[in-house]
Structures are given as structure tokens and as C-alpha cells.
Image (spheres, rainbow, N blue to C red):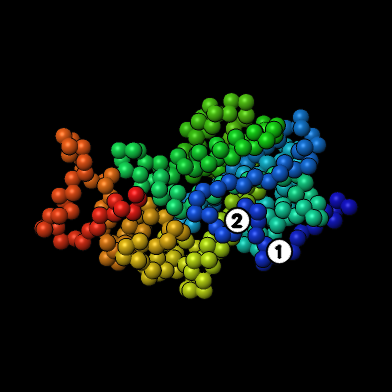
């Protein structure tokens, strides 16, 4: 019986995980699975949790933070399903694994043992945070990533899970981040490490959750907003297909749609290269202290040959 539960699910090309809602939301969202039955049946047993992300570097689409958790005594069982750093797995394998984790109908072993959650930080919200005027203090990518991770861990704790160990994959200095998390979660053993997705099976599982959610979300966004037009590639600035699409689809006023991270230097360079309008925002204007209003004189200077447009109306 147990062997039948563990059999690999044939990947359904139409599979959409519950972490992806249609239509794709332009605002950041989170999704949590129900607590797995095996964890509910052993509420006093220690649970471990892994954290990883997908889509930190691309100029297109969301950055997705994923977590996965299970009973500590079960964690080594994840290896037999083939969980590994998601970048080392084929797309079909990643999707099959997440499909197995969602297979409630057949009571798949992974569904019964492993809970997971994601936060999808949209391109719009990433850019909005990073491009805040200096006087308000911008919300950089690391801060957004940390807050997403902290929020997901808190969400699991709020659901009554007996969480005892957390493993986090990081691209930054591990020691500083680990100390921060230890201060927030003093009763939990925290391990922050580079390449954790290749070391700890529970982080590998989180890696698959995040990667598949991002990939399918990006696919559905493209279908909805751009149909069958030429592919936009992986979304990474170094991808020739992405660069070609980005430079070939610049609107002189709006740039692109909400799938694009306007805070990336790649997009700023593309807007300049393709002669988009130079938009001037009220909050970015120098302040005349005695009158406390934005100095629009620079916009009216006849010696300034660059074409500008006051965009204050856009946010009223």
C-alpha cells in the first residue's frame, strides 16, 4: 500500500499548483497548504522547515519565496523522491514533484507528510519598494526577501506547527542573516547557509515549490498579456531572448506592463536606449524650503533639450 502511495505521478502539462491563481495578481500574495495529516497526528513531534527562493535576479516576473516543512524524523525520506537544488532538475521533474505534493485524491505520501507555502513578490511591488524616493527610504531587495521569509515562518507557527529547526538558503552573508532570524525566533534552531538547497532535502523541497510557482506564474502572465507573440526567454537580463523582447517592446510613456521590474538597471538602460520619455515625479524634485513645494523650474529650462513629462497626475 505504502509503495503505491509513493509512485511517481506522471506530469500533467495542464497542472497549475494552488499557489498560482488565475488571473495572476499584480500585488504580492501568499499561499499556505493545509497542515499535513501526519503532522496533525503527531502534534508534539518536532518539525523542520526549509526556505529558498526563485527569481531573485530576473528582470521579468515575481520573486517567489517558498517554504516546505515536515516531521524531522521524515525529512531524510525526501531524498528517495529525487528532491535536489531545483536548478539541477528538469522542468518536468520539478513539476511532477510539486504535483505529487498536491495529490490529495490518491493520498500521496508527500501530500500526507509535507506542508508548504509561498509568497510571490510581484515585479510591481518589488519595483515600488526599491524606487521609493530617498526621503521616504527605499525598501531594498534584501529587506523584501527577509520580510517574506520571516512572514512565511510566522505563518506556519501561527497555524500551531511545532517548529524546532529552520534551514535557509542565502546569497548574502549567512552569519548576519542567521543572527537576525535567531533574534526573531529565539526558540528555534536556525541554520542559514549558502547552497543549502543542495545540502538539506527540506530546503531542496522548498526550492522546487518556489521555482515551479514562479515558472507557471510567468507562463500564465505571458499568455494573458502577450498571447503567442515571441518568447521573452527566462527573464534574466543575460538571456538574449529576454533582452530582445525587452528592447523591442518599449512604450515611450509607460515602458512595459506590470510584469517588468522597473527598478532593474537593465530596464533603465533600455528605456534610455529606446528614447522613452524622461518622466519627472513630484517627490524627486528638489524642494524649495521656504515655500515647501517641488521646484519645477528645471522642467521648464529651455536649455534642457531632453524631453520630459510631469507625471504627478499619474498617482493622484
Give the image location of residue 250, x and y in percent. 36, 66
The image quarter in which residue 239 lies: bottom left
Residue 299 versus residue 136 in the image, above or below: below
Q: Which mark is residue 278?
A: none
Q: Is residue 98 visible?
A: yes
Q: Is residue 198 visible?
A: no
Horizontal side of residue 180 vs 207, given as left or right: left
* Residue in the picture at 74% in, 64% down: 10
Judging depth in this view, the residue of 21 and 69 nearest the camera is 21
Give the image location of residue 174, x and y in percent. 50, 37
Judging depth in this view, the residue of 31 and 241 nearest the camera is 31
- Mark 2 secondary-structure assignment: loop
Horizontal side of residue 267 vs 158, given as left or right: left
Q: Mark 2 vs mark 1: which is more N-terminal?
A: 1
Residue 18 versus residue 148 in the image, above or below: below
* Residue in the picture at 59% in, 25% down: 186
- Crowding near pointer 1: few (<14 within 10 Å), some, many (20+)? some
Residue at label 1? 11
The image quarter in which residue 310 lies: bottom left
* Residue in the picture at 85% in, 56% down: 4
The image quarter in which residue 45 lies: top right
Give the image location of residue 258, x and y in percent. 44, 58
- Crowding near pointer 2: few (<14 within 10 Å), some, many (20+)? few
Residue at label 2? 21
Residue 47 versus residue 225 in the image, above or below: above
* Residue in the picture at 47% in, 73% down: 230
Judging depth in this view, the residue of 251 and 67 nearest the camera is 251
- Mark 1 secondary-structure assignment: loop
Give the image location of residue 79, x and y in percent. 72, 49
Q: How many marks?
A: 2
Residue 302 versus residue 190 in the image, above or below: below
Amino acid at each position: 500500500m505504502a509503495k503505491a502511495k509513493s509512485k511517481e505521478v506522471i506530469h500533467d502539462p495542464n497542472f497549475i499548483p494552488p499557489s498560482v491563481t488565475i488571473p495572476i495578481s499584480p500585488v504580492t500574495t501568499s499561499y499556505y497548504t493545509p497542515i499535513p495529516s501526519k503532522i496533525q497526528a503527531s502534534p508534539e513531534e518536532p518539525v523542520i522547515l526549509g526556505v529558498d527562493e526563485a527569481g531573485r535576479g530576473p528582470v521579468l516576473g515575481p520573486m517567489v519565496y517558498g517554504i516546505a516543512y515536515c516531521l524531522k524524523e521524515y525529512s531524510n525520506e525526501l531524498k528517495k523522491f529525487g528532491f535536489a537544488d531545483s536548478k539541477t532538475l528538469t522542468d518536468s521533474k520539478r513539476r511532477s514533484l510539486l504535483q505529487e505534493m498536491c495529490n490529495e485524491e490518491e493520498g500521496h505520501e508527500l501530500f500526507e507528510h509535507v506542508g508548504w507555502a509561498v509568497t510571490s513578490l510581484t515585479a510591481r511591488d518589488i519595483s515600488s519598494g526599491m524606487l521609493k524616493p530617498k526621503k521616504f527610504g527605499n525598501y531594498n531587495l534584501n529587506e523584501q526577501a527577509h520580510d517574506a521569509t520571516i512572514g512565511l515562518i510566522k505563518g506556519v507557527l501561527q497555524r500551531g506547527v511545532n517548529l524546532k529547526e529552520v534551514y535557509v538558503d542565502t546569497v548574502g552573508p549567512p552569519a548576519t542573516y542567521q543572527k537576525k532570524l535567531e533574534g526573531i525566533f529565539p526558540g528555534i534552531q536556525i541554520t542559514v547557509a549558502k547552497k543549502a538547497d543542495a545540502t538539506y532535502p527540506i530546503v531542496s523541497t522548498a526550492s522546487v515549490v518556489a521555482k515551479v510557482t514562479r515558472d507557471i506564474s510567468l507562463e500564465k502572465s505571458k499568455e494573458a498579456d502577450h498571447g503567442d507573440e515571441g518568447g521573452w526567454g527566462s527573464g534574466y537580463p543575460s538571456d538574449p531572448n529576454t533582452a530582445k523582447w525587452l528592447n523591442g517592446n518599449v512604450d515611450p510613456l509607460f515602458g512595459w506592463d506590470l510584469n517588468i521590474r522597473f527598478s532593474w538597471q537593465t530596464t533603465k538602460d533600455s528605456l534610455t536606449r529606446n528614447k522613452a520619455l524622461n518622466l519627472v515625479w513630484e517627490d524627486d524634485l528638489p524642494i524649495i524650503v521656504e515655500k515647501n513645494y517641488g521646484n519645477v523650474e528645471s522642467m521648464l529650462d529651455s536649455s534642457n533639450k531632453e524631453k520630459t513629462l510631469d507625471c504627478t497626475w499619474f498617482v493622484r
